[in-house]
Amino acid sequence: MTALNRRGLLGLGGAGLTLLVVGCGRETATPASGALTDLRDRPLGVATPAGKLSIDDGRYLIALSLIHPDPVSVLAAWAGDVNRISPEMYAAFVEKSPALAALPKTPSSAGDFDVEAVLAAGPNVAVVSLGSGPTDAQVSQLEAAGVTVAFIDFFTHPFENQARSLSLLGRLVGREEQATAYNAFRAERLKIISDRVATLTDAQKPTVFLEAHAGNGPDCCNSVGPGNVGDYIAFVGGRNIGADVLTAASGKLNLEYVIDRDPTIYIATGGPHLERAGGFVVGPQYGADQSRASLQRVAARRGIANLTAVSAGRTHGLSHQLLNSPIDIVATEVLAKWIHPELFADLNPRATLDQINTRFLAVPYRGDYWIDLTPSSGSTAPEGVTP
């Protein structure tokens, strides 16, 4: 894999870039109409609509659902990584489009890329993940066989790359207008947050410890550094304690370090994948009491229980599936309310998700995806989505 792929770098220079949102010190850009290029600024010699796609991440199915009334119909293959979208969301997609259950599967971007599996599925375009997709040699193999390769990114640098990635998907499937509409909706919501955060001083930004996949085993503490989830914390005006010591987007913090930093806010992420491990669970199959009880168990562990964030009632839980998703604006609003409850008292993440369900998603989100340990007048618990 090239250094470019490993680092998930993107050159945003060049003509024809239209600015959408400024956040976290980065400019989010999307190419204007004209030459089709991917997130590595590679020209894509393909007519649009481009025909059938393969995708190496199940969350790209969510992205397609934002802009296409039948997203499964444009796929030749998908990654089959059900946990990335949740078993319930997968079941909802199969209910709408039974063909998904029999659709050929290619390896997820979390594993090794498999050229043969993609070729066997016969897509016109292989949509792959920036930072974890095929090597340059594998790209050459696919293109020599007549498969166009398009790199996109919804996760490594979400504020920089999401809008452009959705625009590219929109052009590939002939739904550019719909992609533009959703990007505008997301940009408008993000601007509300960025405008208010711009007035904060560093002293007004509380420290935040986000424990990813909380309770997944006896040891603490999986966390986030710069990029990915860490970008969300910084965007809404928090100081991520993981970013001070981790150099990658994710890593492990020493429990003693967390205790010494004594963060103001503790946020656990989790989902159905943690049920067997006794970790934090949240999602449409869990009631609020069940999710809150699992968050209580996670927060009661040695060292975590004595944090100021826990004793002060600033302990929260968020679905990992919601955060690592093209509808991340909902999670961004949730984080903003938790980190600055007074500044963002008027934000209503549930209403935002309801709008996305109604206006955009072919397969809507249902159930609860975030919760507080101790509900208060400034919290969002047990908000989620009404069916």
Image (tube, rainbow, N blue to C red):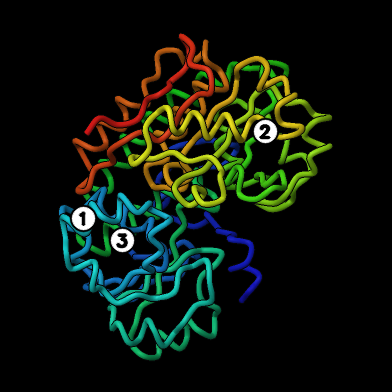
The residue under the point 56% across, 64% down is 131
Please give the residue where the numbered disc 3 appears in the rendered image: 34
> Badge 1, how many Cα within 10 Å: few under 14, some, many 20+?
many
Residue pictured at 33% horizontal, 26% vertical: 350
Observer-nearest of 336 and 2: 336
Picture coordinates of residue 7 (x, y %)?
A: 63, 62
**Residue type (three-letter) at the residue carrying disc 3:** Gly
Instruction: Name the residue beneath numbered marker 1.
Output: 175
Q: Is residue 284 left or right of residue 176?
A: right
- Give the residue at x 28% y 83%: 122
* Closer to viewer: mark 3 or mark 2: 2
Residue at x-position 40% and y-position 28%: 288
* Residue type of the residue flagged with mark 2: Phe
Expressed as whole percent of the image width and height from the top left, the position of residue 55 reads 36, 68
Q: Are marks 3 and 2 in contact (CB under 8 Å)?
A: no
**Circle 1 sits in a helix, a strand or a loop, which is it?**
loop
Provide residue 232's location: percent of width, then percent of height.
55, 37
Residue at the disc numbered 2: 209
| Mark closer to the observer (1, 3) | 1
Q: Quadrant of the C terminus?
A: top left
Give the mark nearest the N terminus, 1 or 2: 1
Alpha-carbon neighbours of circle 2 within 10 Å: few (<14), some, or many (≥20)? many
Instruction: Specify whether 275 is left or right of 5.
Output: left
